[in-house]
Image (tube, grey):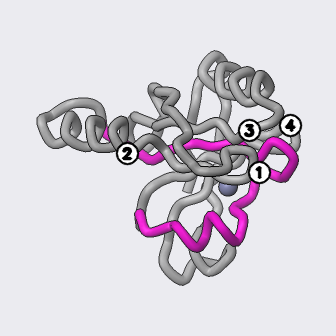
Amino acid sequence: MAIRISRALFDCLMAEAALAPMREICGLLFGTDERIEAVEPARNVAVDPARWFEVDPAALFTAIRAERAGGPRLLGHYHSHPSGVAAPSAQDAATAFDAGRLWLILGGGEALVWRAVPGGPVQGAFEPVRLVVD
Ligand SMILES: [Zn+2]
């Protein structure tokens, strides 16, 4: 299982995360089974954005509505771990209710992709997805 992303888009995400060293950034991922084709930054509405993220529900619902109306396919979302690694935290696992969606996590100078899978091998909630930057 692999998903591709352009170098330009990848660099955009890394830059967005680097600009926010004190809080988790987040946003939405759009594309196909093979490729992340677009990203859309969203507000992090978590109570403590330094330690947690919650994608602005309004942005999420707008994207889901647009997808149902034939718009861009919502693959999942991304967020950063400003002082952590690019792997799902226990807190991420506790909120991974979106089975099948991709979670792209930025941290420690890299970005890794995970798919939410109930009972998955990582934190009991995710499986790794290979990210190919091209
Ligand atoms: Zn996280």
Q: Which mark is residue 35?
A: none
In the picture, measured across the screen, residue 123 lies left or right of residue 31, that is: right
Magenta range: 73-98
Mark 4 or mark 3: whose residue is earlier in sequence: 3
In the picture, measured across the screen, residue 103 lies left or right of residue 29, that is: right
Which amino acid, mark 1? Ala
Q: CA distance from mark 1 to mark 3?
A: 15 Å
Residue at the left extreme, as displayed: 69
The answer to whether the residue bearing label 4 lies less than 8 angstroms from the nearest atom of ligand 1 is no
- In the rendered image, which residue does mark 1 sit on? 86
Which amino acid, mark 2? Pro
Mark 1 or mark 4: whose residue is earlier in sequence: 1
- In the rendered image, which residue does mark 2 sit on? 57
Q: Secondary structure at mark 2?
A: helix
For marks 2 and 1, give the one nearer the viewer.
2
- In the rendered image, which residue does mark 4 sit on? 109
Q: Considering only vertical position in the picture, is 89 above or below 24?
A: below
The answer to whether the residue bearing label 1 lies less than 8 angstroms from the nearest atom of ligand 1 is no
Q: Which mark is residue 23?
A: 3
The reply to whether the C-beta atoms of the residues labelled 2 and 1 are less than 8 Å apart is no
Residue at the top extreme, as displayed: 8
Q: Secondary structure at mark 4?
A: loop
Could you tell me which residue is drawn at 69 percent across and 24 percent down? 16
Mark 2 or mark 1: whose residue is earlier in sequence: 2
Q: Dot 2: within a 10 Å radius of its alpha carbon, few (fewer than 14), some, or many (20 or more) residues?
A: few
Q: CA distance from mark 2 to mark 1?
A: 23 Å
